[in-house]
Image (spheres, rainbow, N blue to C red):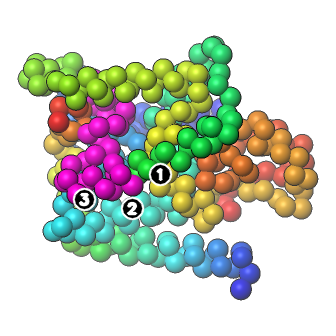
Amino acid sequence: MGYKKMKKYVRKGLLIAAIVLVLMGMSEGGFRDVKNKAVRICYECIGIG
Amino acid sequence: MEKRRKLIQVICAVLYNCNFTGFAKGKIYQGDIKGVCVPGLNCYSCPGAIASCPLGSLQSALVSSKYKFPYYILGLLLLFGVVLGRVICGFLCPFGLIQEILYKIPTPKLKKNRWTRRLSYVKYVILVVFVVGIPLVWAVPGFCKYICPAGTLEGGIPLVAMNEGLKAMTGGLYWWKIFLLVVILLSSVFIFRSFCRFLCPLGAFYSFFHGVSILGMKVDAEKCNHCNACVAHCKMDVKKVGDRECIQCGECKEHCRQCALTFGKK
C-alpha cells in the first residue's frame, strides 16, 4: 500500500474515531461535565490554588 | 497571506472572549456554550471567555478519570488535531497572537539554532508530566495550576483586580504565576513565539498530527528544488515545511521562488 493511500486511511480512521468519541462522550454527559467545570472560576487556573 | 492570517487571529481572539460584560463586572460567563471547547489556548476563567479551554478541560477530565473515561474531550482534541493540526497554532490561538505582537517590538532577536530545536522537546515533557501525569496521580490540573500563562493573563489578573475577596486569597502561587507570565511575555519580545516553541503542551499535542491533518501547508514535490529558502526564513524550529514544529502560518510561501508551497487541503 502506498504512503499516500495509508495516510488517507489513517486520516479517515482518526476522523471517525474522533466523531465516535465525541458522540459517546456527549451521551455520557461529557458536554455537561465540561460546562460544569467551565462556569465556575478555576482557582488553580488563576493562581489562587 | 500574513494580513489575512492576522485578521483571522484577531477575530478569533475577540470571538473567544466576547463576553465583554464579564470584564466590566469581574464575573465569568456561565452560558451553555461553555460546554464546547475552542481549539486554541484560552482560559475558561477569563471573564470574557464564552467557551472552554481544551487543555483545562482535559486536565479536569483526567482528574475525574477514575470515575469516568474522558471520551468527549479526547474526541474533541482528536477532531481538532485531525482537521486542523497546528493550523490552530498559526491561526486560531489568542496566546500565539499576543506573542507575535510582542515580537514586533524592535529589539535584537534571538535567531533559531540547534539549541532552540533541542529546547522544543521540553513542551512534550510538559504535556506528559503536567497535563497528563499530575492530574492522574495527584488529582490537580498541573499545567493550569503551575504554568499556564494564558490563565494568569486572561483570568488571574482581571479577576483578582476586580474582586476584593480573590485579592485577599492571593499568595505564593499567584505571584509565581505572575513571575512566569512576565518571563514568558518578555522572552516573546526577543524570541519568536517562545512559549509555543518550548512550553506549550497544546502545540505539542497538535504536532502529533502534522502528517495526517486535513488542512495545512503542502509542498509540490515536482516544483520544489530543495533550496531550503522556506526553512531558512521560517522563525520556528522547522527542518522542513509542515513538520511537527511548523505552525502552518504560510509565511514561507512568499520566499519560495519555485511557487512550490500552497496552503489548503493536504
Is B154 contained in the magenta span?
Answer: yes
Q: Position of residue B1 (x, y in %)?
A: 70, 38
| Of marks 2 and 1, the one in the foreground | 1
Expressed as whole percent of the image width and height from the top left, the position of residue A14 reads: 50, 73
Instruction: Give the letter of the chain under mark 1.
Output: B
Tell me the number on the disc at residue B38.
none
**Could you give the CA–CA distance between mark 2 and mark 1, rounded to whole angstroms?**
20 Å
Question: Which residue is the site of mark 3?
Answer: B136
- Residues at marks 3 and 1, CA–CA distance in whole angstroms: 17 Å
Q: Same chain, marks 3 and 1?
A: yes
Q: Position of residue B135 (x, y in %)?
A: 25, 54
Return the residue at label 1.
Answer: B124
Q: Residue at x 22, y 65 (%)?
A: B65
Q: Which residue is mark 2?
A: B76
Residue B13 seen from this side: yes
- The amino acid sitting under disc 3 is Leu
* SS of the residue under disc 1: helix
Callout in the foreground (3, 2): 3
Quarter holding residue A7: bottom right
**Amino acid type, mark 1:** Tyr
Judging from the image, mark 3 belongs to the subunit labelled B
Read off the magenta span.
Answer: B128-157
* Badge 2 density bin: few <14, some 14–19, many ≥20, Cα 10 Å: many
Residue at left offset 28%, top offset 26%: B176
Mark 3 crowdedness (10 Å alpha carbons): few <14, some 14-19, many ≥20: many
Tag 2 secondary structure: helix
The kind of residue on which mark 2 rests is Leu
Res B158 seen here:
no
Counting residues from the start of the chain, the first of labels 3 and 1 encountered is: 1
Viewer-proximal residue, B218 or B14?
Answer: B218
Q: Position of residue B141 (x, y in %)?
A: 25, 48
Q: Are marks 3 and 2 in contact (CB under 8 Å)?
A: no
